[in-house]
Image (cartoon, rainbow, N blue to C red):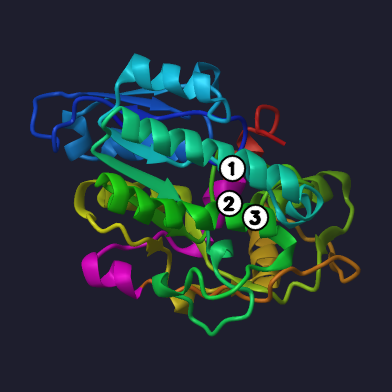
Amino acid sequence: AILAQGFGGAPCVATLRGCERWMSEKPPCWSLGGTGLFGKALAEVIQKEKQAQEENWVFLSSKDGNLTERAAVDQIFERHKPTYVIHLAAKVGGLFHNMRKKVDFFRENMLMNDNVMECCRIHGVKKLISCLSTCVFPDKTTFPIDETMVHNGPPHPSNVGYALAKRLIDVMNLCYKEQHGMNFTSIIPTNIYGPHDNFSMEDGHVIPGLIHKCYLAKRDGTDFVIWGSGSPLRQFIYSTDLAQLTLWVLRNYESVEPIILSVGEEDEVSIKDVGLQIAKAMGFEGKVVFDTTKSDGAYKKTASNNKLRSLYPDYKFISMEEGVQKAVDWFVANYEQARK
């Protein structure tokens, strides 16, 4: 079984049961967390992927369990008896949300991670994939960052609670392997975006937050205001790209060491360029304003995907232009129902 929790929102889980290396016919596969950004992308990929057609995936909602509560996690494992687990659960938010709620981000993520890992051990899960973030890397470092640099110094102070909780996943993966022989590993995606995201302008990530702002600016005939100078640089990965690569890691990557799932260094873009791409995709013709009284956060987090490319050299990412257009079109078409 695969147990996972989607990005954003309340804790939820995804499971894939009985997939003995995907050799049995039509193995039943369970997914909890199918209503969020990653869960929807995973469902979309599974519907189109030939190998996944031999697996019986079922998507559950967050109502099936709160991963911050140990008793609830025990019940989930007892009920679904997973053999493979993808742990994408996290309390997540944008820069300013992280700055305001550092304790909340640390404690809730630590609780989820500890509960899922220990239940994987107790229930004999064959493989666990957990999700880190590029914010786990040191604030003061050389670029590009790679998988060997996770613990080389403290993270940026703006999101220290979230970053340290995520960084400790790597520590525990190694500890569980050494003490209990568990097959735990982790992925490090860059900034994920796409349909079904949290489009909150205060608590969401940069792309969904800017899409919502631009939508309102166009609707109301006001300026499109982007917080900060627009100069920070980021790499963004479209949600279905991350879903496809995560399935590849589940089936093909056998190291305890983390692996960065990202577009290349050459695809890094500034927040200003992201904002302008969103304005173009939205058909916004008004004034774009940068509010420099707001914090920029870390200037850059350039990540190397050389390890991924050495193992999966032929993977083709969705372009930033295409991905932003898809995300904008989805938000406009689903404005009333979108999380915001």
- Residue 291 lies in quadrant: bottom right
> How far across and down, in percent of the image, does residue 318 sit?
41, 59
Q: Nearer the viewer, residue 328 or 62?
A: 62
Count of all numbered marks drawn on residues in the image? 3
In this picture, residue 238 sits left or right of residue 102: left
Residue 6 visible from this viewpoint: no
Q: Disc 3 versus disc 2: distance between alpha carbons?
A: 24 Å
The image quarter in which residue 216 lies:
top right
- Helix, strand or loop for disc 3: helix
| Res. 8 visible in picture | yes
Between residue 225 and residue 22, name the one nearer to us. 22
Q: Which residues are magenta?
A: 306-328
**Lateral position of residue 333 relative to residue 6, left or right:** right
Q: Residue drawn at (47%, 52%), measured in percent from left and top? A: 169
Q: Which residue is mark 2?
A: 165
- Residue furthest out toward the bottom: 142
Q: Residues within 10 Å of mark 3 (few under 14, many from 20)?
A: many
Q: Position of residue 146 (x, y in %)?
A: 43, 74
How far apart, in angstroms, are the residues tagged by discs 3 and 1? Answer: 23 Å
Q: Are marks 1 and 2 in contact (CB under 8 Å)?
A: yes
Provide the residue designation for mark 1: 109
What amino acid is labelled 2 in the image? Ala
Q: Main secondary structure of the magenta part?
A: helix
Secondary structure category for the residue under label 2: helix
The label nearer to you, 3 versus 1, is 1
Amino acid type, callout 3: Ile
Is 318 covered by the magenta stretch?
Answer: yes
Mark 3 = which residue?
Answer: 207
Q: CA distance from mark 1 to mark 2?
A: 6 Å
